[in-house]
Image (cartoon, rainbow, N blue to C red):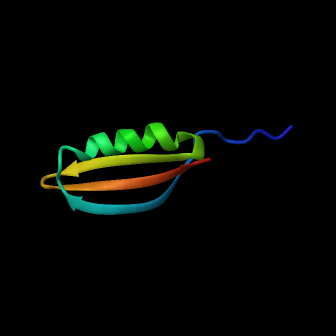
Amino acid sequence: MEQKEQGKLELIATQKVSANAELYKIIDFLNKNLKQHHLMFGLTKKEDTMTISIYEVE
């Protein structure tokens, strides 16, 4: 029997934007509402720039 690896993330896209504290709310909203579509969103901050990442969960 073949086992499929679960929880593997495939990076789809990234976008850098100016830092904004409200982005965390948007990322949380997207993760809660698009989980069933096998999508996950991430947000990282470096100085005054934030990077939004979109992943497909396999």
Residue reaching furthest right?
1
**Residue 34: x and y, percent?**
51, 44
The residue depicted at 42 percent of the width and 47 percent of the height is 41
The residue depicted at 42 percent of the width and 44 percent of the height is 30
Residue reaching furthest left?
48
Q: Above or below — where is 33 with respect to 50? A: above
**Residue 48: x and y, percent?**
13, 55
**Residue 29: x and y, percent?**
38, 40
Q: Above or below — where is 33 with respect to 15? A: above
Classify residue 11 as left or right of residue 22. right
The residue depicted at 53 percent of the width and 40 percent of the height is 35
**Residue 47: x and y, percent?**
13, 52
Q: Nearer the viewer, residue 1 or 42?
A: 42
Q: How many marks?
A: 0
Residue 2 occupies which quadrant of the picture? top right
Q: Nearer the viewer, residue 45 or 33?
A: 33
Quarter holding the N terminus? top right
Q: Nearer the viewer, residue 50 or 30?
A: 30
Classify residue 24 as left or right of residue 46. right
Classify residue 3 as left or right of residue 28. right
